[in-house]
Image (tube, rainbow, N blue to C red):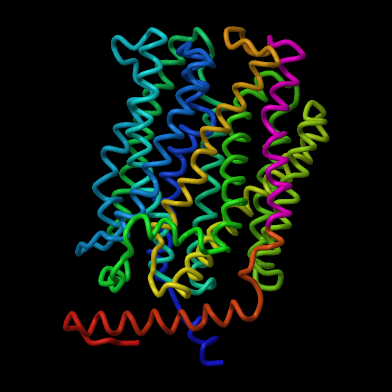
Amino acid sequence: MQQDTALQEERIPLASRVWISLADASVAILQALVAAGALTYYFVNIRGLSTYYTGIVWLLFAIWNAVNDPLFGYISDRTKSKLGRRIPYIRYGTPIFVLSFALFWLDIPGAGSQTGLFLQMLLVLFVFDTLYTAIATSLYIMPYEMAVSNKARSSIFVWKIIFMVFTIVVPLAIERTIKPEVGDLAGISYFRWFMVLFAVGMGIIIFASTFFYREKHYTQSEEQLGFFNAFKQCFTNRSFVIFEVISFTIIFAQTSLMQGLWYYFDEIDVPATPLYIALAAGIICGVFLWINRRDSWGVKWSTRLFSLLFAIGCFVIVLLGANSLAAILGFLLFGVGFAGGMYLIPLMNGDVVDMDEHRTGLRREGMYAGVNSFITKPSISLAQWAFLTIITAYGYDATLAKGAQSPGAEAGILVGWALIPGILLLLSFVALHWYPLDGTEWLNIKARLAEVHKEKERKYLESQGYKFVE
């Protein structure tokens, strides 16, 4: 009973919860605009880069991610500073992050040819993602630096969900309002400078957030494993291996579905407003459902259910996406799936890291986040490449005006948009049957970890000359 009380009494200050969530959403919005549709649409349809070269950019980018993400996770776990292991990367990486985002949209002299456009997109993407990895990974794992119980972490994730809604709404709003048409020079110019100024605003939020939360510094005193041993240890954690199936799938699905919207409403004759309302309703209902049922159903079974519902939504769109009523159902289920991905996946990831600490005695959020990205972030590139490859095979012509594609190309948009995410989500539903972190025994392990963290914090403060106060 005493262990349960320790879990229930863990608290995170309101200001910390809000600012972490604001910063996380700001980074995610910029990433969504890059990875989930706007960047590809801009370079292909507006700048004229071929779908072939654009696909190559995303595949090369996937190779860079294979090196970039686990390496940063390893470095951040071993970072020692007065600000902590994560905050320095957020605070001082933000200006470069914003600058690289701005360079995507600017018309750089000499970059008008296919080769120039290819190099602009590729090189800026490499810089942008390096800083994105440093900042987003640090923000993503910050709740695990601050709390061990799902209740305390959930108090952060609820705020994250509130602000993460904007990571869906903002790209959609940009797509519906200022997306430039082919040949519209004034619209293209306005779009470019809007994106630059918007990034500056997001950067100010991210930078300012670092003054409103702090890390538990005792983690800096822990001796960490070497890189290759740390990498290998992640894959000896069975829960992590199974978690990666759903983690990869959610990133792939979110990327593909958000990207497809930029093409779906251009070419499929369905009213947008009812579909956006259905998507919003699904997100809202999903948030309430998963929050209220998290404890009674458990994280594992809630995740299985949202995977199944999300998959059904994808198959509805593939088969009946040109029908308005069927599309409303598909978008409603998309919303339920997006809500589950935003709320339940971070909780599951935290449990996986907790199991690693239970096994090894070390807190290694950074390495786990890096290896998770090593596996999942290529899904961003693969989703982009797969969509472009499929619609090209079905006859999509990027030089045509809005609404002028052939019936075959319209069918290709539906298939490229939702078929692969639907299959992956169904496979995830099956794979999660073997996910082990569930039930009474697991809750008891988490309760013991809460006591271990409290003892580590006490010893660290006393070693620094402070008095520990509960």
What's the residue at 38%, 42% (across, down)?
67
Q: Residue furthest bottom?
A: 1
The residue sitting at 29% across, 71% down in the picture is: 222
Q: Is residue 407 magenta?
A: yes
Can residue 19 be seen by looking at this rendering? no
* Numbered label tally: 0
Q: Is residue 92 above or below residue 111?
A: below
Quadrant, the N terminus: bottom right
**150 relative position to 292: left or right:** left
Please indicate whether residue 405 sits to the left or right of residue 451 in the image: right
Q: Is residue 22 left or right of residue 285?
A: left
Identity of the residue drawn at 18% across and 79% down: 464
User: Which corner quadrant of the image does residue 212 belong to?
Assistant: bottom left
What residue range appears in magenta?
Answer: 404-431
Instruction: Verify whether residue 237 appears in magenta.
Output: no
x and y, in percent, of residue 423 in the image: 72, 41
Quarter of the picture holding the C terminus: bottom left
Residue 237 shows in this picture: yes
Residue furthest left in the image: 465
Residue closer to the observer: 160 or 315: 315
The x, y position of residue 58, in whole percent, is 48, 28
Q: Residue at x 61, y 21 (%)?
A: 389
> Where in the figure is residue 445, as x and y percent of width and height?
54, 80
- Predominant secondary structure, magenta span: helix
Q: Position of residue 267 (x, y in %)?
A: 69, 18
Relative to 390, is 200 above or below? below
